[in-house]
Image: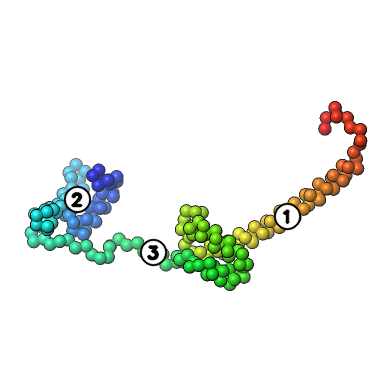
Amino acid sequence: MKLSKIGSKSTYHRCTKELHHYKYLVYEPSHNPFKGSIIKMLKFETTSGQALDLAVPNQGQALVPSNKHIQTIENSYKLPQPKNENEVLEFFKKEKWPEIEAQKFYNHYCAIGWKIGGKIKMENWHASAKNWMLKAEELSVRAGHIERSRDTRTNDKRQSQIKDNLHTIRNKNYNQPL
């Protein structure tokens, strides 16, 4: 394990079982912790150019099948990233959103490599675009609310200044606390 730089026993056993499956070695596991497992390996010689196992007569080269028995299946629901900006523009037009929002969306995700939060690869850009639209709508509502509250605050300030100006006196006593 140390020579092969494998840190876990389960990884070691999985690798030896896989090598046994592909007939690179013969692995006879011992389920007794005090007795070691038996591993028969090929003897590699440079003179004949052929790998031979002395324990198995008439053995040819171990052939590995072209398809691995452990395969990762890509998710079929993943959409590839858009080919160009026009594809994003068409999607936003179809959803009846302004072109400027489509450009913002495309430029933002191009800049961060089509990743969500800068870390996770985007699986469905259509869903992300719809979320972008929802956020933009939410932000515009908030901005309108903030603008309205800012207007009322400035009006209130002006009103209070006018009132204060009416009740001021010219001769002030600066020794008096506020």
Relative to 15, does residue 172 appear above or below in the rendering? Answer: above
Name the residue beneath numbered marker 2. 29
Whether residue 91 can be seen here: no
Q: Position of residue 102 (x, y in %)?
A: 58, 65
Q: Secondary structure at mark 2?
A: loop
Query: Who comes first in sequence, dot 1 or dot 3?
Result: 3
Relative to 62, does residue 86 appear above or below in the rendering? Answer: below
Q: CA distance from mark 1 to mark 3?
A: 48 Å
Whether residue 21 can be seen here: yes
Q: Position of residue 112 (x, y in %)?
A: 50, 56
Q: Secondary structure at mark 3?
A: loop
Q: Amino acid at mark 1?
A: Glu
Mark 2 and mark 1 residues within 8 Å of each other at the beta carbon? no
Q: Say how many tags the image has.
A: 3
Mark 1 Cα within 10 Å, few/some/many (few <14, many 20+)? Answer: few
Mark 3 Cα within 10 Å, few/some/many (few <14, many 20+)? Answer: few
Q: Secondary structure at mark 1?
A: helix
Name the residue beneath numbered marker 1. 147
2 vs 3, front mark = 3
Mark 1 and mark 3 residues within 8 Å of each other at the beta carbon? no
Task: Give the residue at x 24% y 56%.
Answer: 18
Relative to 157, does residue 122 appear above or below in the rendering? Answer: below
Q: Amino acid at mark 3?
A: Glu
Quadrant housing the N terminus: top left
Q: CA distance from mark 2 to mark 3?
A: 34 Å
Q: Quadrant of residue 138?
A: bottom right
Q: Nearer the viewer, residue 38 or 48?
A: 48
Name the residue beneath numbered marker 3. 74
Q: Position of residue 36 (x, y in %)?
A: 18, 45
Query: Who comes first in sequence, dot 2 or dot 1?
Result: 2
